[in-house]
Amino acid sequence: MVLPIFLTLAAISILTALLMVLSKNPVHSVLYLILTFFAIAGQYILLNAQFLAVVHIIVYAGAIMVLFLFVLMLLNLSKETEPQKSAMWKLSGGIAAGMLLVTLVGALRGGIEVTIPENASGKVGLVENLGMVLFTDFVVPFEIAGILFLAAMVGAVLVGKRDLQV
Amino acid sequence: MLESIRSIPIDYYVYLSTVLFVIGVFGVLIRRNAIVVLMCIELMLNAVNLLLAAFSTYLSDAQGQIMVFFIMVVAAAEAAVGLGILVMIYRNTKSTDISLLDNLKN
């Protein structure tokens, strides 16, 4: 019963990702990428990682993509006047990406052996368990992530200022 | 719930992540709009996130999902700073075309 859901979500995510890359209008690209993110959030729910799915939707669809859309609207790039790369570039880009895909799939073709632990409970993705791990084993990286956000915020404000007096 | 997860082989997740990553690489190679290039980088990060979450669930180990949170942190910081730089570039060149940004070449 789970396999058809997985295949549907995978097809949606691949299709919308391709449309994101190929659509001429950048606003359409943003909207297709949001659809891709929702399909990936569905995969997280399928993996029983509900907290991850919720955080994914809040952070990506709620914050990052709105930021992208806001910048696109601010710069008024929603028209379809984007300069296109030549057909030669597109062909060679397609060949390069296709060769990367063939290489990766060929390297993975032997199959991956995963030994599932005996005491697996399926509760690993719930917020209680994740919070315990995050605030015991990973508390120092957590604090460093806060410092990174502060530095990124100061940097973005400084870069975005119009006439910087240094 | 756990039994239903295991009806999907882990290979399927690996292949799905590979395809999404390659689509991101393809977008970076063929697009000229810097904002779309940044979005393709986000797509590549998400492909890796999906793989980490899949292995985390299959191996019943929470560390993979914690790693996904840290990747999200870095992605959010990167998007904020990257878009700030892009707005500044747009003010100077009136364009977000990455092929104009070859000043270091000469």
Image (spheres, rainbow, N blue to C red):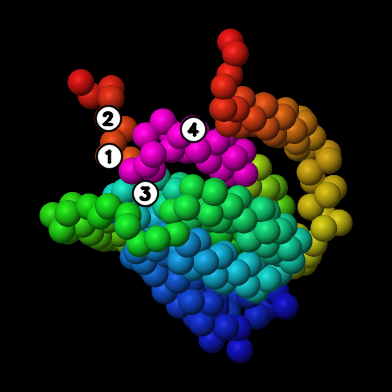
Q: Which residue is mark 4?
A: B88
Q: Nearer the viewer, mark 4 or mark 2?
A: 4
Residue A44 in the image: state x and y as whole percent: 64, 67
Q: Which residue is mark 3?
A: B33
- Assess disc 3: are there few (<14), some (14-19) or many (≥20) residues with their C-alpha within 10 Å of its C-alpha: many
What is the quadrant of residue B95 in the picture?
A: top left
| Kind of residue at badge 3 | Asn
| Kind of residue at badge 1 | Ser
Q: Which residue is mark 1?
A: B99
Residue drawn at (28%, 25%), measured in percent from left and top? B103
Residue B25 in the image: state x and y as whole percent: 35, 52
N-terminal of the two: label 4 or label 1? 4
Point out the image quarter for the C terminus of chain B: top left
Q: Which residue is mark 2?
A: B102
Chain designation of label 2: B
Q: Nearer the viewer, mark 4 or mark 1?
A: 4
Q: Which residues are magenta?
A: B75-97
Q: Nearer the viewer, residue A109 or A66?
A: A66
